[in-house]
Amino acid sequence: MSTEFRLKTGLADMLKGGAIMDVTNAAQARIAEDAGAVSVMALERVPADIRRDGGVARMSSPEKIREIIESVSIPVMAKVRIGHFVEAQILQEMGVDFVDESEVLTPADEENHIDKHAFEVPFVCGCRNLGEALRRIGEGAALIRTKGEAGSGNIVEAVRHLRQIGNELRRLTILTDDELMSAAKELRAPYEIVRMVARDGRLPVPNFAAGGVATPADAALCMQLGAESVFVGSGIFKSTDPEQRAKAIVKAVTHYRDPAMLVEVSMGLGEPMRGLDIATMPEEELLQTRGN
Amino acid sequence: MGAIPEAKTVDPGPGPAPSPAAPRIGVLALQGSFALHAAVLRRLGIEAVEVRRAAALAGLDGLIIPGGESSTMLKFLLEEDLFDPLIAFHREGGALYGTCAGAILLARTVENPAQESLGLLDIEIQRNGYGRQLESHLGACSCSALGEPDLPLVMIRGPVISGTGPRVEVLAEWRGQPAFVREGRVLATTFHPELTNDTRVHAYFLELAAGGETPVSAENVEAPG
Protein backbone atom coordinates (compact mmCIF):
# COMPACT_ATOMS: atom_id res chain seq x y z
CA MET A 1 0.00 0.00 0.00
CA SER A 2 1.34 3.43 -0.78
CA THR A 3 2.14 5.41 2.35
CA GLU A 4 -0.14 8.24 1.33
CA PHE A 5 -3.03 5.82 0.88
CA ARG A 6 -2.51 4.48 4.43
CA LEU A 7 -3.18 7.98 5.77
CA LYS A 8 -6.42 8.14 3.80
CA THR A 9 -7.79 4.78 4.97
CA GLY A 10 -6.45 5.58 8.46
CA LEU A 11 -8.97 8.38 8.86
CA ALA A 12 -11.74 6.04 7.67
CA ASP A 13 -10.55 3.51 10.30
CA MET A 14 -10.97 6.16 13.01
CA LEU A 15 -14.56 6.80 11.92
CA LYS A 16 -15.60 3.16 12.38
CA GLY A 17 -18.46 2.36 14.72
CA GLY A 18 -19.87 5.85 14.33
CA ALA A 19 -22.57 7.93 12.68
CA ILE A 20 -21.82 10.54 10.02
CA MET A 21 -24.61 13.07 9.60
CA ASP A 22 -25.68 15.28 6.69
CA VAL A 23 -25.81 18.96 7.67
CA THR A 24 -26.52 22.11 5.67
CA ASN A 25 -25.33 24.78 8.13
CA ALA A 26 -23.37 25.43 11.35
CA ALA A 27 -26.40 25.06 13.64
CA GLN A 28 -27.14 21.56 12.31
CA ALA A 29 -23.43 20.66 12.49
CA ARG A 30 -23.37 21.54 16.19
CA ILE A 31 -26.49 19.47 16.84
CA ALA A 32 -24.78 16.52 15.14
CA GLU A 33 -21.53 16.98 17.11
CA ASP A 34 -23.39 17.36 20.41
CA ALA A 35 -25.26 14.14 19.66
CA GLY A 36 -21.94 12.28 19.25
CA ALA A 37 -21.56 12.14 15.46
CA VAL A 38 -18.01 11.14 14.43
CA SER A 39 -18.16 13.44 11.40
CA VAL A 40 -20.54 15.73 9.53
CA MET A 41 -21.23 15.83 5.80
CA ALA A 42 -21.73 19.32 4.37
CA LEU A 43 -24.19 19.64 1.49
CA GLU A 44 -26.42 22.39 0.15
CA ARG A 45 -29.74 20.56 0.72
CA VAL A 46 -30.47 17.21 2.36
CA PRO A 47 -31.33 14.49 -0.18
CA ALA A 48 -35.09 14.57 0.59
CA ASP A 49 -35.15 18.26 -0.38
CA ILE A 50 -33.04 17.68 -3.49
CA ARG A 51 -35.55 15.03 -4.51
CA ARG A 52 -38.50 17.35 -3.81
CA ASP A 53 -37.06 20.52 -5.39
CA GLY A 54 -35.45 19.02 -8.47
CA GLY A 55 -33.02 21.21 -10.45
CA VAL A 56 -29.24 20.79 -10.45
CA ALA A 57 -27.74 19.84 -7.08
CA ARG A 58 -24.13 21.02 -6.69
CA MET A 59 -21.34 21.21 -4.09
CA SER A 60 -22.30 23.37 -1.10
CA SER A 61 -21.07 26.98 -1.22
CA PRO A 62 -17.59 27.68 0.20
CA GLU A 63 -19.14 30.08 2.73
CA LYS A 64 -21.36 27.33 4.13
CA ILE A 65 -18.51 24.85 4.21
CA ARG A 66 -16.25 27.35 5.97
CA GLU A 67 -19.00 28.04 8.50
CA ILE A 68 -19.41 24.33 9.21
CA ILE A 69 -15.64 23.70 9.47
CA GLU A 70 -15.34 26.52 11.99
CA SER A 71 -18.27 25.36 14.10
CA VAL A 72 -17.16 21.80 14.99
CA SER A 73 -14.01 19.94 16.09
CA ILE A 74 -14.91 16.61 14.40
CA PRO A 75 -13.86 15.87 10.78
CA VAL A 76 -15.90 17.58 8.07
CA MET A 77 -16.83 15.82 4.83
CA ALA A 78 -18.45 17.47 1.83
CA LYS A 79 -20.08 16.24 -1.36
CA VAL A 80 -19.01 16.88 -4.95
CA ARG A 81 -20.75 15.89 -8.16
CA ILE A 82 -19.59 12.65 -9.81
CA GLY A 83 -16.66 13.52 -12.10
CA HIS A 84 -16.44 17.15 -10.95
CA PHE A 85 -12.77 17.22 -10.03
CA VAL A 86 -12.68 21.00 -9.75
CA GLU A 87 -15.28 20.99 -6.98
CA ALA A 88 -12.98 18.45 -5.29
CA GLN A 89 -9.95 20.72 -5.78
CA ILE A 90 -11.88 23.53 -4.09
CA LEU A 91 -12.83 21.33 -1.12
CA GLN A 92 -9.25 20.09 -0.73
CA GLU A 93 -7.97 23.66 -0.79
CA MET A 94 -10.46 24.56 1.97
CA GLY A 95 -9.15 21.79 4.24
CA VAL A 96 -12.18 19.49 4.09
CA ASP A 97 -11.22 16.14 5.68
CA PHE A 98 -13.06 13.73 3.33
CA VAL A 99 -14.72 14.26 -0.07
CA ASP A 100 -17.85 12.30 -1.04
CA GLU A 101 -18.12 11.90 -4.81
CA SER A 102 -21.85 11.46 -4.58
CA GLU A 103 -24.74 10.29 -6.73
CA VAL A 104 -27.00 12.48 -4.55
CA LEU A 105 -25.75 15.52 -6.48
CA THR A 106 -26.35 15.90 -10.22
CA PRO A 107 -23.52 14.14 -12.09
CA ALA A 108 -21.03 16.39 -13.91
CA ASP A 109 -19.59 13.54 -16.01
CA GLU A 110 -21.69 10.62 -17.19
CA GLU A 111 -18.66 8.54 -18.24
CA ASN A 112 -15.86 9.11 -15.75
CA HIS A 113 -15.40 9.41 -12.02
CA ILE A 114 -12.71 11.60 -10.48
CA ASP A 115 -9.11 10.29 -10.49
CA LYS A 116 -8.92 10.19 -6.74
CA HIS A 117 -5.24 9.15 -6.68
CA ALA A 118 -4.44 12.69 -7.81
CA PHE A 119 -5.67 14.15 -4.50
CA GLU A 120 -4.22 14.25 -0.98
CA VAL A 121 -7.68 14.46 0.56
CA PRO A 122 -9.35 11.04 0.95
CA PHE A 123 -12.53 10.19 -0.99
CA VAL A 124 -15.62 8.13 -0.19
CA CYS A 125 -17.78 6.77 -3.04
CA GLY A 126 -21.09 4.95 -3.17
CA CYS A 127 -21.72 1.54 -4.72
CA ARG A 128 -24.50 -0.96 -5.27
CA ASN A 129 -22.38 -4.07 -5.79
CA LEU A 130 -18.83 -5.41 -5.54
CA GLY A 131 -17.76 -4.49 -9.06
CA GLU A 132 -18.74 -0.87 -8.54
CA ALA A 133 -16.93 -0.82 -5.17
CA LEU A 134 -13.74 -2.21 -6.73
CA ARG A 135 -13.85 0.25 -9.65
CA ARG A 136 -14.06 3.13 -7.17
CA ILE A 137 -11.20 1.67 -5.10
CA GLY A 138 -9.22 1.32 -8.33
CA GLU A 139 -9.77 5.04 -8.91
CA GLY A 140 -8.43 5.74 -5.41
CA ALA A 141 -11.43 5.79 -3.05
CA ALA A 142 -10.28 5.23 0.57
CA LEU A 143 -13.76 4.43 1.84
CA ILE A 144 -16.79 2.75 0.28
CA ARG A 145 -20.41 3.22 1.25
CA THR A 146 -23.59 1.69 -0.08
CA LYS A 147 -25.66 4.01 -2.22
CA GLY A 148 -29.00 2.87 -0.84
CA GLU A 149 -31.67 5.27 -2.04
CA ALA A 150 -30.82 8.68 -0.56
CA GLY A 151 -33.65 10.88 0.70
CA SER A 152 -36.16 8.02 0.64
CA GLY A 153 -36.26 7.24 4.36
CA ASN A 154 -36.48 3.62 3.19
CA ILE A 155 -33.71 1.21 4.16
CA VAL A 156 -34.56 -1.45 1.55
CA GLU A 157 -31.97 -0.35 -1.02
CA ALA A 158 -29.09 -0.07 1.49
CA VAL A 159 -29.95 -3.59 2.67
CA ARG A 160 -29.97 -4.82 -0.92
CA HIS A 161 -26.55 -3.27 -1.57
CA LEU A 162 -24.97 -4.55 1.69
CA ARG A 163 -26.23 -8.06 1.01
CA GLN A 164 -25.10 -7.90 -2.60
CA ILE A 165 -21.55 -6.86 -1.65
CA GLY A 166 -21.33 -9.49 1.11
CA ASN A 167 -22.60 -12.19 -1.18
CA GLU A 168 -20.20 -11.32 -4.02
CA LEU A 169 -17.26 -11.10 -1.57
CA ARG A 170 -17.94 -14.56 -0.21
CA ARG A 171 -18.25 -15.99 -3.71
CA LEU A 172 -14.86 -14.58 -4.72
CA THR A 173 -13.13 -16.34 -1.85
CA ILE A 174 -14.03 -19.82 -3.14
CA LEU A 175 -12.67 -19.29 -6.65
CA THR A 176 -9.35 -20.78 -7.69
CA ASP A 177 -6.56 -18.46 -8.84
CA ASP A 178 -7.11 -19.33 -12.49
CA GLU A 179 -10.77 -18.28 -12.23
CA LEU A 180 -10.01 -14.76 -10.98
CA MET A 181 -9.33 -13.11 -14.33
CA SER A 182 -12.73 -14.19 -15.58
CA ALA A 183 -14.27 -12.96 -12.31
CA ALA A 184 -12.56 -9.59 -12.80
CA LYS A 185 -14.01 -9.43 -16.31
CA GLU A 186 -17.51 -10.12 -15.04
CA LEU A 187 -17.16 -7.64 -12.18
CA ARG A 188 -15.63 -5.08 -14.59
CA ALA A 189 -13.05 -4.46 -11.88
CA PRO A 190 -9.22 -4.25 -11.79
CA TYR A 191 -7.67 -7.74 -11.69
CA GLU A 192 -5.06 -6.88 -9.01
CA ILE A 193 -7.74 -5.66 -6.64
CA VAL A 194 -9.99 -8.65 -7.37
CA ARG A 195 -7.07 -10.97 -6.48
CA MET A 196 -6.44 -9.12 -3.23
CA VAL A 197 -10.11 -9.23 -2.24
CA ALA A 198 -10.35 -12.95 -3.10
CA ARG A 199 -7.33 -13.61 -0.86
CA ASP A 200 -8.52 -11.51 2.10
CA GLY A 201 -12.28 -12.07 1.86
CA ARG A 202 -12.95 -8.39 2.47
CA LEU A 203 -12.60 -5.00 0.83
CA PRO A 204 -9.18 -3.33 1.15
CA VAL A 205 -10.87 -0.19 2.54
CA PRO A 206 -13.61 0.25 5.17
CA ASN A 207 -17.22 -0.27 4.09
CA PHE A 208 -19.96 1.97 5.54
CA ALA A 209 -23.74 2.06 4.93
CA ALA A 210 -25.74 4.99 3.53
CA GLY A 211 -29.07 5.75 1.95
CA GLY A 212 -32.45 5.58 3.69
CA VAL A 213 -31.44 5.29 7.37
CA ALA A 214 -34.34 6.79 9.38
CA THR A 215 -34.41 4.95 12.72
CA PRO A 216 -31.94 3.52 15.28
CA ALA A 217 -33.11 0.07 14.20
CA ASP A 218 -32.22 0.88 10.57
CA ALA A 219 -28.70 1.86 11.69
CA ALA A 220 -28.27 -1.32 13.76
CA LEU A 221 -29.58 -3.41 10.85
CA CYS A 222 -26.86 -2.02 8.57
CA MET A 223 -24.21 -2.76 11.21
CA GLN A 224 -25.41 -6.34 11.70
CA LEU A 225 -25.27 -6.78 7.92
CA GLY A 226 -21.57 -5.91 8.01
CA ALA A 227 -21.38 -2.13 7.64
CA GLU A 228 -18.62 -0.59 9.78
CA SER A 229 -20.34 2.80 10.27
CA VAL A 230 -23.50 4.53 9.10
CA PHE A 231 -24.15 7.74 7.15
CA VAL A 232 -27.46 9.41 8.01
CA GLY A 233 -28.82 11.94 5.55
CA SER A 234 -32.35 13.27 5.66
CA GLY A 235 -33.29 10.88 8.48
CA ILE A 236 -32.15 13.29 11.22
CA PHE A 237 -33.26 16.74 10.13
CA LYS A 238 -36.47 15.57 8.44
CA SER A 239 -37.69 13.97 11.68
CA THR A 240 -39.71 15.80 14.34
CA ASP A 241 -36.95 15.74 17.00
CA PRO A 242 -33.50 15.86 15.36
CA GLU A 243 -31.50 16.14 18.63
CA GLN A 244 -32.98 13.01 20.20
CA ARG A 245 -32.98 11.03 16.97
CA ALA A 246 -29.35 11.90 16.27
CA LYS A 247 -28.31 10.74 19.76
CA ALA A 248 -30.34 7.56 19.43
CA ILE A 249 -28.74 6.64 16.10
CA VAL A 250 -25.23 7.24 17.52
CA LYS A 251 -26.00 4.87 20.39
CA ALA A 252 -27.63 2.28 18.14
CA VAL A 253 -24.47 2.08 16.01
CA THR A 254 -22.31 1.33 19.08
CA HIS A 255 -24.77 -1.06 20.74
CA TYR A 256 -25.97 -2.63 17.50
CA ARG A 257 -25.99 -6.18 18.89
CA ASP A 258 -27.61 -5.26 22.22
CA PRO A 259 -31.43 -5.49 21.90
CA ALA A 260 -32.01 -4.09 25.41
CA MET A 261 -30.05 -0.94 24.49
CA LEU A 262 -31.89 -0.72 21.16
CA VAL A 263 -35.21 -0.73 23.00
CA GLU A 264 -33.99 2.03 25.30
CA VAL A 265 -32.64 4.30 22.55
CA SER A 266 -35.68 3.78 20.30
CA MET A 267 -38.11 5.31 22.82
CA GLY A 268 -39.31 8.91 22.95
CA LEU A 269 -38.02 9.96 19.54
CA GLY A 270 -41.15 11.52 17.99
CA GLU A 271 -41.93 10.78 14.36
CA PRO A 272 -39.32 9.58 11.86
CA MET A 273 -39.22 11.10 8.36
CA ARG A 274 -42.18 9.99 6.29
CA GLY A 275 -40.36 7.89 3.69
CA LEU A 276 -41.08 6.70 0.15
CA ASP A 277 -42.03 3.34 -1.35
CA ILE A 278 -39.21 2.71 -3.79
CA ALA A 279 -41.03 -0.12 -5.63
CA THR A 280 -43.58 2.42 -6.94
CA MET A 281 -41.01 5.11 -7.85
CA PRO A 282 -40.32 5.77 -11.54
CA GLU A 283 -36.85 4.59 -12.59
CA GLU A 284 -35.75 8.10 -13.60
CA GLU A 285 -36.31 9.38 -10.05
CA LEU A 286 -33.79 6.93 -8.55
CA LEU A 287 -30.49 8.49 -7.44
CA GLN A 288 -28.63 5.18 -7.07
CA THR A 289 -28.41 4.57 -10.83
CA ARG A 290 -26.19 7.65 -11.30
CA GLY A 291 -22.54 6.75 -11.89
CA ASN A 292 -21.68 3.06 -12.19
CA MET B 1 0.32 0.44 -10.59
CA GLY B 2 2.05 1.35 -7.30
CA ALA B 3 -1.01 3.26 -6.16
CA ILE B 4 -3.22 0.19 -5.93
CA PRO B 5 -3.97 -0.31 -2.24
CA GLU B 6 -2.99 -3.50 -0.51
CA ALA B 7 -4.88 -5.21 2.31
CA LYS B 8 -5.45 -3.16 5.44
CA THR B 9 -3.59 -5.56 7.67
CA VAL B 10 -1.51 -8.64 7.14
CA ASP B 11 -3.24 -11.83 8.24
CA PRO B 12 -1.52 -12.55 11.53
CA GLY B 13 -2.06 -16.31 11.41
CA PRO B 14 -2.69 -18.28 14.59
CA GLY B 15 -0.07 -16.42 16.66
CA PRO B 16 1.78 -17.69 19.73
CA ALA B 17 -0.18 -19.44 22.46
CA PRO B 18 -0.78 -17.25 25.51
CA SER B 19 1.35 -18.04 28.53
CA PRO B 20 -0.45 -19.11 31.73
CA ALA B 21 0.17 -15.65 33.18
CA ALA B 22 -1.24 -13.83 30.15
CA PRO B 23 -3.03 -10.66 31.26
CA ARG B 24 -6.73 -10.22 30.54
CA ILE B 25 -7.12 -7.22 28.27
CA GLY B 26 -10.15 -5.25 27.15
CA VAL B 27 -10.56 -2.79 24.29
CA LEU B 28 -13.03 0.04 24.75
CA ALA B 29 -15.35 -0.63 21.80
CA LEU B 30 -17.60 2.43 21.76
CA GLN B 31 -16.22 3.69 18.45
CA GLY B 32 -12.98 3.93 16.44
CA SER B 33 -10.07 1.56 15.82
CA PHE B 34 -10.98 -1.01 18.51
CA ALA B 35 -11.05 -3.97 16.10
CA LEU B 36 -7.56 -3.09 14.82
CA HIS B 37 -6.23 -3.07 18.40
CA ALA B 38 -7.87 -6.44 19.01
CA ALA B 39 -6.15 -7.77 15.87
CA VAL B 40 -2.72 -6.66 17.16
CA LEU B 41 -3.39 -8.33 20.52
CA ARG B 42 -4.41 -11.53 18.70
CA ARG B 43 -0.99 -11.54 17.01
CA LEU B 44 0.48 -11.43 20.51
CA GLY B 45 -1.64 -14.39 21.62
CA ILE B 46 -4.27 -12.38 23.52
CA GLU B 47 -8.02 -12.56 22.80
CA ALA B 48 -9.29 -9.14 23.90
CA VAL B 49 -12.70 -8.44 25.42
CA GLU B 50 -14.76 -5.70 23.74
CA VAL B 51 -15.92 -3.28 26.43
CA ARG B 52 -19.12 -1.32 25.79
CA ARG B 53 -20.53 -1.35 29.31
CA ALA B 54 -18.87 -0.92 32.72
CA ALA B 55 -19.70 -4.49 33.78
CA ALA B 56 -17.26 -5.78 31.14
CA LEU B 57 -14.34 -4.21 33.04
CA ALA B 58 -14.62 -6.82 35.81
CA GLY B 59 -11.65 -9.17 35.87
CA LEU B 60 -9.54 -7.23 33.37
CA ASP B 61 -5.87 -6.42 33.99
CA GLY B 62 -5.65 -3.78 31.29
CA LEU B 63 -7.79 -1.69 28.95
CA ILE B 64 -6.94 -0.06 25.62
CA ILE B 65 -8.78 3.12 24.67
CA PRO B 66 -8.51 3.24 20.87
CA GLY B 67 -8.20 5.97 18.30
CA GLY B 68 -11.38 7.55 16.99
CA GLU B 69 -13.29 10.69 17.85
CA SER B 70 -12.66 11.66 21.48
CA SER B 71 -15.76 13.88 21.62
CA THR B 72 -17.95 10.94 20.59
CA MET B 73 -16.38 8.52 23.08
CA LEU B 74 -16.56 11.11 25.86
CA LYS B 75 -20.34 11.36 25.41
CA PHE B 76 -20.66 7.62 25.97
CA LEU B 77 -18.41 7.79 29.06
CA LEU B 78 -20.53 10.55 30.59
CA GLU B 79 -24.00 9.39 29.57
CA GLU B 80 -23.66 5.65 29.97
CA ASP B 81 -21.95 5.56 33.36
CA LEU B 82 -18.46 4.57 32.23
CA PHE B 83 -16.53 7.63 33.43
CA ASP B 84 -16.32 6.77 37.16
CA PRO B 85 -15.92 3.02 36.56
CA LEU B 86 -12.83 3.75 34.41
CA ILE B 87 -11.34 5.88 37.19
CA ALA B 88 -12.11 3.08 39.67
CA PHE B 89 -10.53 0.53 37.29
CA HIS B 90 -7.28 2.54 37.40
CA ARG B 91 -7.44 3.02 41.17
CA GLU B 92 -7.86 -0.72 41.67
CA GLY B 93 -4.70 -1.48 39.73
CA GLY B 94 -5.86 -1.79 36.11
CA ALA B 95 -3.43 -0.71 33.39
CA LEU B 96 -4.57 1.68 30.66
CA TYR B 97 -3.24 2.50 27.19
CA GLY B 98 -4.75 5.25 25.05
CA THR B 99 -3.96 5.91 21.38
CA CYS B 100 -4.74 9.34 19.92
CA ALA B 101 -8.36 9.89 21.05
CA GLY B 102 -7.60 7.51 23.93
CA ALA B 103 -4.67 9.71 25.00
CA ILE B 104 -7.02 12.71 24.94
CA LEU B 105 -9.55 10.92 27.17
CA LEU B 106 -6.82 9.92 29.67
CA ALA B 107 -5.24 13.39 29.91
CA ARG B 108 -5.41 15.80 32.83
CA THR B 109 -6.15 18.81 30.58
CA VAL B 110 -7.58 18.92 27.04
CA GLU B 111 -7.51 22.00 24.81
CA ASN B 112 -8.51 23.06 21.27
CA PRO B 113 -11.30 22.98 22.29
CA ALA B 114 -11.36 22.20 26.01
CA GLN B 115 -13.32 19.10 26.99
CA GLU B 116 -13.70 16.88 30.03
CA SER B 117 -11.26 14.03 30.51
CA LEU B 118 -10.49 11.21 32.95
CA GLY B 119 -7.38 12.90 34.38
CA LEU B 120 -5.49 9.63 34.85
CA LEU B 121 -2.38 10.84 33.02
CA ASP B 122 -0.71 14.11 34.00
CA ILE B 123 -0.41 15.62 30.53
CA GLU B 124 -1.84 18.64 28.76
CA ILE B 125 -2.94 17.79 25.22
CA GLN B 126 -4.10 19.77 22.17
CA ARG B 127 -6.73 18.08 20.02
CA ASN B 128 -5.91 18.08 16.29
CA GLY B 129 -2.56 19.60 17.24
CA TYR B 130 -1.12 19.32 13.74
CA GLY B 131 -4.27 20.52 11.97
CA ARG B 132 -6.81 18.82 9.75
CA GLN B 133 -6.59 15.60 7.69
CA LEU B 134 -4.26 17.16 5.09
CA GLU B 135 -1.70 17.48 7.93
CA SER B 136 -1.94 13.77 8.79
CA HIS B 137 1.50 12.23 8.25
CA LEU B 138 3.84 9.28 8.63
CA GLY B 139 7.21 9.13 10.32
CA ALA B 140 9.39 7.12 12.68
CA CYS B 141 10.62 7.94 16.16
CA SER B 142 13.35 6.41 18.27
CA CYS B 143 12.31 4.83 21.55
CA SER B 144 15.09 3.54 23.81
CA ALA B 145 12.62 1.52 25.91
CA LEU B 146 11.73 -0.54 22.82
CA GLY B 147 15.14 -0.62 21.15
CA GLU B 148 15.84 -0.82 17.42
CA PRO B 149 14.45 -0.16 14.88
CA ASP B 150 12.65 3.17 15.24
CA LEU B 151 8.91 2.99 15.88
CA PRO B 152 6.85 3.61 12.74
CA LEU B 153 4.46 6.45 13.33
CA VAL B 154 1.06 7.04 11.72
CA MET B 155 -0.46 10.35 12.79
CA ILE B 156 -4.13 10.83 11.81
CA ARG B 157 -5.45 14.28 12.79
CA GLY B 158 -3.25 13.59 15.79
CA PRO B 159 -3.10 15.46 19.09
CA VAL B 160 0.02 17.18 20.45
CA ILE B 161 1.13 16.74 24.07
CA SER B 162 2.01 20.28 25.12
CA GLY B 163 2.87 19.66 28.76
CA THR B 164 3.79 16.77 31.09
CA GLY B 165 3.74 16.51 34.89
CA PRO B 166 6.79 15.50 36.98
CA ARG B 167 5.85 11.82 37.20
CA VAL B 168 5.36 11.40 33.46
CA GLU B 169 8.15 9.64 31.56
CA VAL B 170 8.57 10.57 27.92
CA LEU B 171 9.37 7.31 26.07
CA ALA B 172 9.45 8.80 22.56
CA GLU B 173 9.25 12.21 20.95
CA TRP B 174 8.08 13.43 17.57
CA ARG B 175 8.88 16.88 16.18
CA GLY B 176 10.21 17.89 19.60
CA GLN B 177 7.02 16.97 21.51
CA PRO B 178 6.26 13.87 23.63
CA ALA B 179 4.49 11.25 21.49
CA PHE B 180 4.72 8.16 23.74
CA VAL B 181 4.40 8.69 27.50
CA ARG B 182 3.96 6.69 30.66
CA GLU B 183 2.85 7.46 34.18
CA GLY B 184 2.76 4.37 36.35
CA ARG B 185 0.28 1.93 34.80
CA VAL B 186 -0.95 4.42 32.20
CA LEU B 187 0.50 4.59 28.67
CA ALA B 188 -0.42 6.91 25.82
CA THR B 189 0.68 7.45 22.24
CA THR B 190 -0.47 10.32 20.05
CA PHE B 191 0.11 8.02 17.05
CA HIS B 192 -1.47 4.71 15.98
CA PRO B 193 0.63 1.52 16.36
CA GLU B 194 -2.59 -0.39 15.56
CA LEU B 195 -2.32 0.88 11.98
CA THR B 196 1.14 -0.67 11.53
CA ASN B 197 2.61 -4.18 11.71
CA ASP B 198 4.85 -3.22 14.66
CA THR B 199 3.54 -4.87 17.84
CA ARG B 200 6.16 -3.59 20.31
CA VAL B 201 4.05 -0.89 21.98
CA HIS B 202 1.26 -3.40 22.58
CA ALA B 203 3.74 -5.98 23.90
CA TYR B 204 5.11 -3.32 26.27
CA PHE B 205 1.56 -2.63 27.47
CA LEU B 206 0.89 -6.34 28.03
CA GLU B 207 3.97 -6.55 30.22
CA LEU B 208 2.75 -3.56 32.20
CA ALA B 209 -0.74 -5.03 32.57
CA ALA B 210 0.71 -8.39 33.71
CA GLY B 211 2.58 -6.55 36.45
CA GLY B 212 5.93 -7.72 35.13
CA GLU B 213 9.20 -5.83 35.06
CA THR B 214 9.33 -3.15 32.42
CA PRO B 215 12.50 -1.33 31.42
CA VAL B 216 11.33 1.86 33.13
CA SER B 217 9.10 2.25 36.14
CA ALA B 218 7.48 5.16 37.85
CA GLU B 219 5.33 2.92 40.05
CA ASN B 220 7.32 3.62 43.16
CA VAL B 221 6.86 7.37 42.98
CA GLU B 222 3.17 7.28 42.15
CA ALA B 223 0.98 8.71 44.91
CA PRO B 224 -1.40 6.20 46.49
CA GLY B 225 -5.05 6.22 45.45
Image: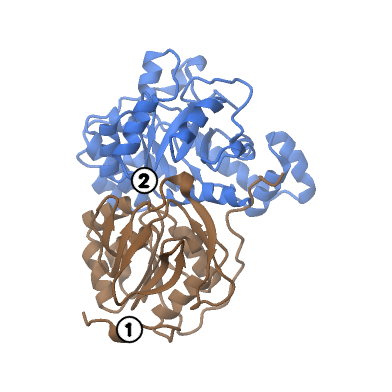
Chain colours: A blue, B brown
Q: Disc 1: which chain?
A: B
Which residue type does callout 1 highlight?
Glu
Taking the image as shown, residue A39 lies to the left or right of residue B200, namely: left
A141 over B149 or under it: above or below: above
The residue to which callout 1 is attached is B219
Secondary structure at numbered mark 2: loop
Residue A265 x %, y %: 26, 46
* Residue A110 badge: none
- Residue A79 horizontal/vertical position (percent): 45, 30
Residue B182 position by quadrant: bottom left
Q: Comparing marks 2 and 1, which lies closer to the viewer?
A: 1
Image quadrant assignment for residue B60 = bottom left
Q: Image point 61% across, 62% down: which residue?
A: B11
* The residue positioned farthest toward the front in the image shown: B176
In the picture, measured across the screen, residue A94 lies left or right of residue B195, that is left
Q: Residues within 10 Å of mark 1 (few under 14, many from 20)?
A: few
Residue at figure coordinates x 75%, y 44% from the top left? A180
The correct choice, above or below, for A99 with respect to A225 in the image is: above
The residue carrying mark 2 is: A38
Residue B206 coordinates in the image, percent (x, y):
45, 76
Tell me if I can see residue A220 in this picture: yes
In the image, residue A44 sits, relative to residue B8, either above or below, namely above
- Horizontal side, residue A231 vs residue A201: left or right: left
